[in-house]
Image (cartoon, coloured by chain):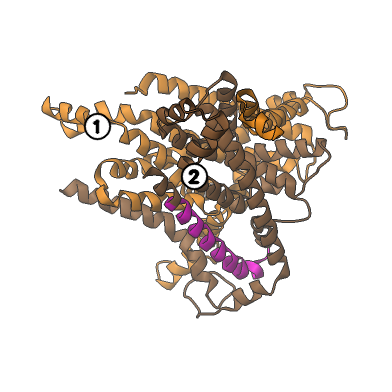
Amino acid sequence: MQSRQVLTDGAGFRAAMSMPGVLVTFGLVLFALALVVVLAFRINDGALFVGPLSLSNMITIFSDGLYAKVMLRSLWISGLVTLATVITAYPVAWYLAFRAGKRRGLVLFLVTLPFWTSYLLRVFAWKVVLAYNGVLNSAMIALGIWDTPSTAFLNNPTAVVVTLAHAYAPFAILPIFVALQTIPPSLLEAASDLGASRAQSFRRIILPLSMPGVLGGALVVFVPTIGDYVTPAMLGGPSSTMIGNLIQAQFGKANDWPFGAALAVATMLVILIAVALVRQADRRWGSRT
Amino acid sequence: MKPLRILHAYVGAYIVFLYVPVALIPLFSFNDAIQAAFPLKGVTLEWYRTLVATPAIGQALRNSLIIAAAAATITTICATTIAYLDVFPRPVLSRLVSGLARLPILIPGVIVGIALLILVNLAGLGPSRPAIVLGHVLVCLPASVTVIRARFAAIPRSLAEAAADLGASDWIVFRRAILPLAASAIGSAFTLAFLTSFDEFIVAYFLAGTEPTLPLYIWSQLRFPKSLPVVMALGTLILLVSVLLAGLAELLRRRSRV
């Protein structure tokens, strides 16, 4: 009876309802991130948090050209992946919003289904396709298009870009579709009544109004791909090491957790800058209804 | 008419591109050769027999199921309460919590993984199944909060107000008026969280102790060319389960809109 009384009381109810969320957000999300930031300013002396703070990790990251190079490569690869994903997704989202009719539910389900299947398996599938004695080479030889297997498909950044673009393809469709769907048809009718061509109404109405979706979609592709370490490790070879691989190595073979944490902090800073730029772009071009 | 036909062809080609590489996994899981290459050599069930006869796979499956069930349960409880407080009473703290709960979507998996690795080491827990559960709660939370919050937001305020006017306490309003209306969306969020956790590799990699999940088991086998056919058989079964669960979540989500 007592506990029921507490639950039904307004303040008690709110406290009980707040608890799981407060625990998980402050206790897990914020606390874990704070630990990473603090650890980034420690040195690798065996004790995690006991001992003096130091800037040495940050100095290494900013002075050794290797890290800038890997960071730029990660930005370049994830930037290409983001661009490819958004551009290829846009027509599909457009179809879903304006032309799918009765088939909308089915097509939407088909394009979002891979989203819920194992990422590791999707990457592995590309390894099967691109390998030296893999699907692509064996199929081409069987068809007589070339006669010796090519090593050109694997262990380079292109393989990483193709695989990531495929793995993250469905991520961009949903936000763009949602943005397109909220455009009132009356705007398009008004434009055509006023003599706008289809190209004009696309460029002046549809594209600007769908920009928030495009930028949102770009963000959900960009964030996981810039930190990815599985695809570069499986398909990229040494020439496509990304920042995620370096972070992973510090918590594995290299066993320098503070330096790994510092690399993570640097990556988060790069992401924050990207988010800020997107916000800025959204404010300028992303007019909303 | 013609541009429309090009659009149809494009959407068709896009869907084919999405599915073709993944469809190769089931195809080669029945192929009677170690090497995944054309031409196909013949049909065999040998890889599935080996799979069933490998105890490590059964153990990894058990780990994955336990972790996914725990992670999905915790995520759904957190997401439901967070979304409810965000949509209905709306004090400032609730909106902050709701924002923070969706923050992990801006953090790459590798950083979620190491952040929790540091946390569980500090807490004395160490890499273990509970550690993976915590990691997966963070991974699943943003999508779950978004799905459930959208459903709560679509429920007319007047319903809760009417119930309160008729003397229902906050708890009764939540339990008897709001939860039943959102049940399908909550079920859908649970299923998707379960699925995300079941398939998750990037975060689990850092947090696994001596008990691997299925994706971690697969990763450990990828180095050995001889075990690839069995990996493909296993991958086929995982894909099948994923597709069935995603279909179930979709059905629940559709019902929640009616």
The residue sitting at 82% across, 22% down in the picture is: A53
The residue sitting at 37% across, 24% down in the picture is: A286
In front: B88, or B94?
B88
- Residue B249 numbered mark, or none: none
The residue sitting at 73% across, 32% down in the picture is: A261
Q: Is residue B229 magenta?
A: yes
Task: Please name the residue that numbered disc 1 is placed on.
Answer: A202
Residue A136 shown left or right of residue B101 in the figure:
left
User: In which quadrant of the rendered view does residue B122 lie?
Assistant: top right
Task: Please name the residue that numbered disc 2 is placed on.
Answer: B183
In front: A284, or B176?
B176
Q: Colour of chain B?
A: brown
Disc 1 residue type (three-letter): Phe
Residue A265 shown left or right of residue A84 in the figure:
right
Residues shaded magenta: B224-251
Q: Colour of chain A?
A: orange
Q: Residues within 10 Å of mark 2 (few under 14, many from 20)?
A: some
**Residue A100 visible (yes or no):** yes
Chain bearing mark 2:
B
In the rendered image of this protein, does residue A281 appear above or below residue A179?
above
Magenta: main secondary structure equals helix
Instruction: Please tell me whether mark 1 sits on a helix, a strand or a loop.
Output: helix
In the rendered image of this protein, does residue A68 appear above or below residue B249?
above
Where residue A234 appears, x then y in whole percent? 61, 53
Residue B149 shown left or right of residue B11 in the figure:
right
User: In which quadrant of the rendered view does residue A214 lie?
Assistant: top left
